[in-house]
Image: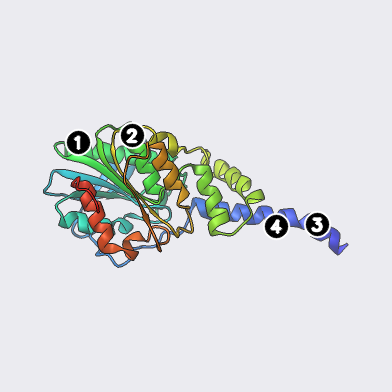
Amino acid sequence: MLISMTMVGAPTLVGGAAATAAWLALYPPVPRDLGGAQDLDDDAEKVAIPLPDGDTLPGWHLPGSRGVTLLLLHGYGRSHHRMWRYAGFLRAAGYGALAIDFRSSRRGRRLPTTLGHHERDDVEAAWSWLQQNVPHDRLGVMGESLGGSVALLLAADHPDAELVIVDCPFATGGDAVDDMLVRFLRLPRWPFAPMARHVGILASGHDPCATDVLQAAARLRDRRVLFIHSQNDERVGPRHSERLWEAAGSRHPLWRVDGARHNKAWIARRAEYEQRVLDFLEDRPTA
């Protein structure tokens, strides 16, 4: 009898665990992660960016003096605070910046994380805001993890995105789900990946595995892109950036950061990180 009950209960337990994991993936905790960077909230102009559905997107704008402004996109389970680590040195060098919170990271009227769908609507609105409010600036986009992948999607559709910097992006939504479950959570792909995908579709109405960043990267062969990936990335394996770099023609700079974990390259190699990004923006070759 005990054996029979255990056999019947096992699928329920597995299914419940997968559903819980999928729900947490859709609505993860969002810590206020500065990681040692200065909080620039009080220095920035707080803006409400209109969205086509009547909603608004919170943004923080720091004007620059160089005539170049970058849209800064945070990663999964983070907020705009994470991007102050980059805005700090960009601002010191004269670059403007607009950091946003994806609606999947805000407290009120929060949307689920969709690995590209809702996030893409957010960045389109932010890009339109930049085009209208800094019309004479050259524009670029910098993102990490999920924000990096969305940056590539955005740039592929906007020829005026002249400069693109991505740190630990994922190549496809399906591969990102697999890596999170297998590489990070140490769970077997089967049955957890199909269950997580199913729960994601039910909760958001969008397939989290449908995002294909490789196709976007293939459209950026003539644009300037800097790929950065931590070689000890425990969440999104280095192969993601390798594939994106190859899709973009293997002609862009790809910095493989030894000894760093997921989106920790700035922490592990701060001086070199900042210099490489500035060299890229100023079109100086990196030794």
Question: Gap in Å between the C-alphas at discs 4 and 1?
Answer: 52 Å
Instruction: Choose between 221 and 5: the one closer to the eye.
Output: 221
Instruction: Choose between 174 and 59: the one closer to the eye.
Output: 174
Quadrant where the N terminus sits is bottom right
Residue placed under numbered mark 4 in the picture: 13
Question: Gap in Å between the C-alphas at discs 1 and 3?
Answer: 61 Å
Up-down relation of residue 27 to residue 155 (above or below): below
Contact? badges 4 and 3 (CB < 8 Å):
no
Contact? badges 4 and 1 (CB < 8 Å):
no
Among the two numbered marks 2 and 1 on one chain, the one whose residue lies closer to the N terminus: 1
Among the two numbered marks 4 and 2 on one chain, the one whose residue lies closer to the N terminus: 4
Residue 151 in the image, given as x and y percentages of width and height: 34, 42
Among the two numbered marks 4 and 1 on one chain, the one whose residue lies closer to the N terminus: 4
Residue placed under numbered mark 2 in the picture: 221
Instruction: Choose between 273 and 146: the one closer to the eye.
Output: 273
Horizontal placement of 201 versus 56: left or right? right
Among the two numbered marks 4 and 3 on one chain, the one whose residue lies closer to the N terminus: 3
Asked which secondary structure carries label 4, the reply is helix
Question: Gap in Å between the C-alphas at discs 4 and 3?
Answer: 10 Å
Contact? badges 2 and 3 (CB < 8 Å):
no
Crowding at dot 1, Cα within 10 Å, few <14 / some 14-19 / many 20+, comes out as few
Residue placed under numbered mark 1 in the picture: 132
Among the two numbered marks 1 and 3 on one chain, the one whose residue lies closer to the N terminus: 3
Asked which secondary structure carries label 1, the reply is helix
Q: Tell which tag, 2 or 3, sits nearer the viewer.
A: 2
Residue 237 in the image, given as x and y percentages of width and height: 48, 53
Type of the residue with mark 4: Leu
Type of the residue with mark 2: Arg
Question: Gap in Å between the C-alphas at discs 2 and 3?
Answer: 53 Å
Residue 123 in the image, given as x and y percentages of width and height: 33, 41
